[in-house]
Image (cartoon, helix red, strand yellow):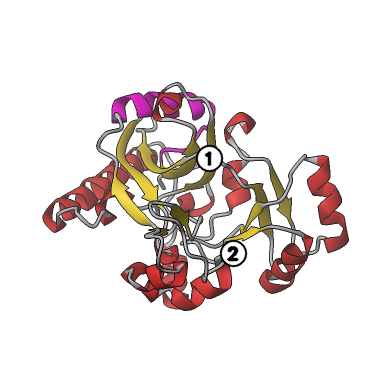
Amino acid sequence: MVNTCLQNGGFFEENKKEILTQIPAEYLPKSLYIERDTDFTSINSLMEHRSIEYPVVAKPLDEQRGKNVEIITDEAELLTYYLKVSKAFVIQEFVQFPIELAILYSRLPHERKGVVSSITIKEFLSVTGDGKQSIQKLLKANYRAVLIWEELLINAKIDFQRIPSFGETIIVEKIGNHCRGTIFRNATEIDKAKTAAAIDKIMADFEGFNYGRFDLKVKSVEDLYAAKNIKILELNGVNADAAHIFDPNYGLIQAMKDVAWHWKRLADIAAFNLSQGYSPIAFKPILNKILKS
């Protein structure tokens, strides 16, 4: 057991509400958790009570990899989403901060300070205009866009026939996930030690959390170091990847070495917790989960 405060350590059946509500509110977007039996007619008034305005991001509490994550612009779209997912989900304000990062952080259970071993900056699917071609034609030249073309037609709320001016950049997909066309870039320019010190501050009172990846937005790198103007969108547990290895320019051999380091880190944390009397997850539930995936 690595994260003793989370169900199954965050390996499977993790719940976003369970995790996010343990983080100080100043580091979270304004959020509203919708249970499966919530009457839709009450949602807008609940949003108004929490000062949450459209656009918002909606995502199920128990899904990952960007599945069923949508930007909602009005009540009609929210109703469509509510009827489609038919399960508990969270509504978050759409954070406008310009930098989105994935930061993998870990700390040994008997230590107060942790380490940051991976920082990834997310580059959203976008096109740059030449003053001649439509957004659709520009996207057709992007292999990432072609691979998810049908999803883009459904999810991207843009005019595909518009012709951007020369040099104009249009962000087509604002959800930062591989399956939505995002490029993950190894952010070597961001200091890991300074970032770790900021995460130490944020997680100071989060007992039992020892390993995971923060998906967050921040106004600037300087604000990241100062632990201010940060909004944590998600925090994943032991199933979290060191996302920098997915940088298209990152070497395969080094990526394999990095994965091995993180596995060793997980093993060291688990071994310590086991020595303190914590029990591991039984193998059968894990196997059943894998077989059902």
* Residue at the image position 41 percent from the left and 48 percent from the top: 1
- The front one of 50 and 237 is 50
What is the spatial separation of the Cα atoms under label 1 and label 2, in whole angstroms? 24 Å
- The front one of 91 and 160 is 160
Please tell me which of labels 1 and 2 falls first in the chain. 2
* Residue at the image position 86 percent from the left and 49 percent from the top: 45
User: What is the number of callouts on the image?
Assistant: 2
Which disc number belongs to residue 57?
A: none
- State yes or no: discs 1 and 2 in contact (Cβ < 8 Å): no
| Crowding near the residue tagged with mark 2, few <14, some 14–19, many ≥20 C-alpha atoms within 10 Å | some
Q: Does 122 sit above or below residue 288? A: above
Whether residue 194 appears in magenta in the rendering, the answer is yes
The answer to whether any part of residue 113 appears in the image is no
Residue position marked by numbered label 1 in the rendering: 232
Residue position marked by numbered label 2 in the rendering: 157
In the rendered image, residue 44, in percent from the top left (x then y), is placed at: 82, 53
Q: For the view shown, which residue lies furthest in the top direction?
A: 226
The C terminus sits in image quarter: bottom left
* Residue type at tag 2: Lys
Q: For the view shown, which residue lies furthest in the left direction?
A: 253
Q: The residue tagged with tag 2: helix, strand or loop?
A: loop
In the rendered image, residue 141, in percent from the top left (x then y), is placed at: 33, 71
* Residue type at tag 1: Ile
